[in-house]
Image: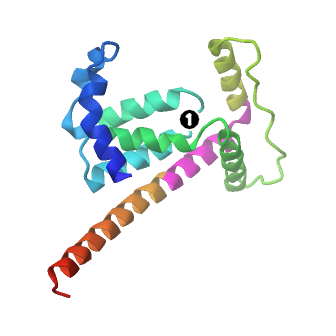
C-alpha cells in the first residue's frame, strides 16, 4: 500500500497537468495532500471510510472536497472509498439500517424496502428516486450510517496507525539485525 501511495505521489505531476485536468493542478498539487506520514495517511483512510457510505458518485467528490479542507493524504482518502461499490452498498446499507433500528429500540420494525432500479432513466431522475427512497427509510438508516461510518473510520484510523507502527518496528529490528547487534 505504501509503495502504491508513493508511486501515486510521484506520478501526480504528470496526472494533474494533463490537458483536461490542468485547471485542477494548482489546487491539488500541494505537498500537504500527497505527504506520506502516518497521521495524514491514517486521517485520509478514516475520511475515505466515513465518506464511502454516501450513495453513488458524490462520495468521491465529497471525499475530495473534505480531503482538501482537512489537508489529509488525498490518494489514501480516495482509495478508502472503494470498499463501497454497487455490489457491497446494499448489504452495507442493510447493516446500517438494522443497526439504526436496534439503536432506536425498534428491532421488529420490518425489513428495508426495495431500492429504485436504474431502468431507462437519466441520472437526475434516478438520483431523485434514490433520495426519496432514503428519506422514506428515515432515522434508522441515518443513525445507522452515522454509527457505522464513525465505527469504520475509527477502526481504519487505528489499523493504519498500528500497521504503520508495526512496519517501523520491523524495519528497526531488520536494520539492527543487519548490523549484527542483536
The question of residue 151 being in magenta is answered with: yes
Horizontally, is 137 left or right of 41 in the view?
right
Left or right, 169 with respect to 87, comes to: left
Q: Quadrant of the C terminus?
A: bottom left
x 28%, y 32%: residue: 12
Magenta-colored span: 136-152
Asked if the magenta segment contains residue 6, the reply would be no
Residue at 32 percent of width and 67 percent of height? 167
Q: Is residue 112 visible?
A: yes
Question: Mark 1 highlights which residue?
Answer: 54
Q: Is residue 24 above or below residue 87?
A: above
Q: Quadrant of residue 84?
A: top right
Q: Residue furthest bottom?
A: 182
Instruction: State which quadrant residue 14 falls in.
Output: top left
Q: Is residue 17 above or below residue 84?
A: above
> Looking at the picture, does residue 22 appear above or below residue 145?
above
Q: How many marks?
A: 1
The crowd level at tag 1 (other Cα within 10 Å; few <14, some 14-19, many 20+) is some
Against 74, residue 38 (above or below) is below
Dominant SS type (magenta): helix
Q: Residue drawn 67% across and 55% down?
A: 103
For label 1, the SS is: loop
Q: Position of residue 18 (x, y in %)?
A: 30, 18
Amino acid at each position: 500500500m505504501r509503495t502504491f501511495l508513493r508511486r501515486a505521489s510521484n506520478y501526480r505531476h504528470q496526472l494533474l497537468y494533463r490537458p483536461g485536468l490542468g485547471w485542477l493542478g494548482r489546487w491539488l498539487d500541494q505537498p500537504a495532500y500527497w505527504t506520506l506520514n502516518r497521521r495524514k495517511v491514517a486521517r485520509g483512510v478514516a475520511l475515505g471510510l466515513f465518506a464511502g457510505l454516501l450513495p453513488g458518485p458524490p462520495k468521491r467528490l465529497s471525499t475530495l472536497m473534505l480531503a482538501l479542507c482537512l489537508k489529509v493524504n488525498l490518494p489514501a482518502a480516495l482509495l478508502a472509498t472503494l470498499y463501497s461499490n454497487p455490489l457491497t452498498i446494499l448489504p452495507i446499507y442493510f447493516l446500517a439500517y438494522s443497526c439504526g433500528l436496534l439503536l432506536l429500540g425498534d428491532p421488529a420494525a420490518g425489513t428495508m424496502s426495495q431500492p429504485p432500479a436504474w431502468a431507462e432513466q437519466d441520472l437526475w431522475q434516478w438520483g431523485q428516486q434514490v433520495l426519496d427512497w432514503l428519506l422514506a427509510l428515515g432515522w434508522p438508516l441515518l443513525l445507522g450510517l452515522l454509527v457505522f461510518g464513525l465505527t469504520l473510520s475509527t477502526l481504519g484510523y487505528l489499523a493504519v496507525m498500528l500497521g504503520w507502527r508495526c512496519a517501523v518496528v520491523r524495519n528497526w529490528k531488520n536494520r539492527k539485525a543487519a548490523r549484527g547487534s542483536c
